[in-house]
Structure formats: structure tokens, C-alpha cells
Image: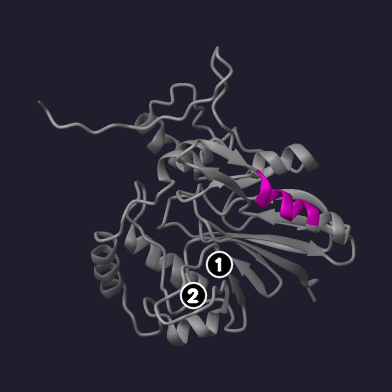
Amino acid sequence: MDAKPLIEAFFDEATYTVSYLVADAETREAVVIDPVMDFDIASGEADTRSAERILAFAEQQDWRISMVLETHAHADHLSAAPFIKGRTGAPIGIGEHIRDVQEIFRPVFGLDDLRTDGSDFDRLFHDGDQFSVGALRFTVMHVPGHTPADLAYLVADAAFVGDTLFMPDYGTARADFPGGDARTLYRSVRRLLSLPDETRLFLCHDYKAPGRDDYRWETTVGEERRTSIHVHDGVDEDSFVAMREARDATLPVPRLLLPSIQVNIRAGRFPEAESNGVRYLKIPVKTKAV
């Protein structure tokens, strides 16, 4: 029988993001999934307090962080993966299709220095890859649709699904970012929901559905299949695509999209400082002809 992981969640209310520490009880080896770098867009100030919470907890538990895993290149928060790597030496892993995402966004931001081979990351995972963390055995599942590169990480009876699914009362990820596709998302969701009903799903976000007072980020395959407002059993592909595309057309742009994407496709690395010692991010400006 596969070893059961120890799981600790860290919720960042500013971005509604959940990061995870997943550890092997026997060897005390652990991974971090989707760590957040605090970023104030008004002042341009970056802070590591959320990542420090994760490191402090790991130290208290005597857990050794051996890898940082990204489920995808996030569009709503900056990644703290390089900070954690700097403190622990843990390599950063993401899906191989991050190369597609880099190809899409390199011209959007005019990032002439960006390599589009995924080499900013230490490890590129393929669908079906397996790796060990102590006695824990992880399996990688490619679940595109939200972005081309989304992954879920499966270990024992748990699956860390990133943005692909939300709590049943909130639904599913948007699919309108460049490279996203609602039909592909539906197929990825159905693949996740083909896992055993008792599989625990750990989500990357929660926004508190209307009528709910608390934040939640853990559900099960069975609960999603029975009650998800978007993808419960009986919802067919065409109906989902029509719903998802109509809903996406009404959603605002994420507040941190512009800084997040250009940093996260570099594995969370900020651009190099210029001659004055300051690092700069780019903001594409759309203007009407005058």
C-alpha cells in the first residue's frame, strides 16, 4: 500500500490561493506546491512572508523540503519558488508544456531574453511521470484547458489539481486566457473525475461561493461528480463549453495578471536589475489610433 502523505495547507487571502506542504512521515522529506510571493502592485513591493510561513512550519516539523512543484504558470499571484529554492536548494518542477506558454507570452511582453525551452525550471514533467519523495510516490497528470501546461499531482488518495477544479459550489477554472480552451478543460476535468470517488482533491483557490461563510479547499471526486455546479455527472461536453465560454466573457482580468505571467513563466524569477539597480516589469499598453 502506498504511503499516506502528511498535508498542511497555507491560505493567502489576498490572492485566494492555497499552497501546500506535502511530507512523508517516515523520512520527513517534503514538497511545496504552488507557493505564493506577496506582491503589492501599487507600490511594486515584493515580500516573502507567505513563503516564510511555509519554511517555518517545515522547520518546526523537521520536514526537509526537497522539491517545489508548480501546477501551472499562475495568472493571479507571483510564485515564491525561487525564494524557497534559494533557502532549501529544492529544484523547481512544472509541466513540459510550459514551453508552449512561454512561446505564447514571449511576444506579448516583448521578452527578447526569455528562453522558450523551459530551462528556467529545473524539471519538466510529462503526463504519467512518477517520482518519489521519501516513501511517497507521486504521479503526474496533464490536465490542460485552463492553460496548456496545467498539471495535477497524485499521491496515495490525494490529488493536487491546481486551478482546474474549484469547490463543487463554485465550479471550474476559466479557460479564456491565451492557450486556454473550454473543450480541453472539460476533458481534463472528466479525466480527474474518473479517479476513485474517495480521492481527495486539494484545490489551488477558493473564492467563497455565494451563501458560504468560510474558505474551503478540499473536496472529493465523488462530491464533485454529485454536486459540482459546472461538471456534475450528466453535464455533457457541449453544454459545459457553452456555459464556460459565456461565463468567461463576463469575468474581469485578474488583478495581478500582468506581473504574474511574466514572472511565473521564468519560474518565478524577476528580470535582472538594470544599471540603476532596479528591476522592472512590463505593462503592455493598448491605445486607439489618434
Q: Which mark is residue 88?
A: none
**Horizontal side of residue 112 vs 72, given as left or right:** left
Q: Quadrant of residue 84?
A: top right
Is residue 3 covered in magenta? no
Q: Which mark is residue 203?
A: 1
**Horizontal side of residue 58 vs 122, given as left or right:** right
Is any atom of residue 165 visible in this view? yes
Type of secondary structure dominating the magenta stretch: helix
Please report the residue visible at 89 percent of the width from the left and 60 percent of the height from the top: 27
Q: Earlier in the sequence, mark 1 or mark 2?
A: 2
Q: Are marks 1 and 2 in contact (CB under 8 Å)?
A: yes
Please report the residue visible at 66 percent of the width from the left and 39 percent of the height from the top: 82
User: In this orientation, which residue lies closer to the viewer: 74 or 124?
Assistant: 74
- Mark 1 belongs to which amino acid? Leu
The residue labelled by disc 2 is 167
Is residue 49 covered in magenta? yes
Q: Quadrant of residue 39?
A: top right
Over which residues does the magenta segment extend? 48-56
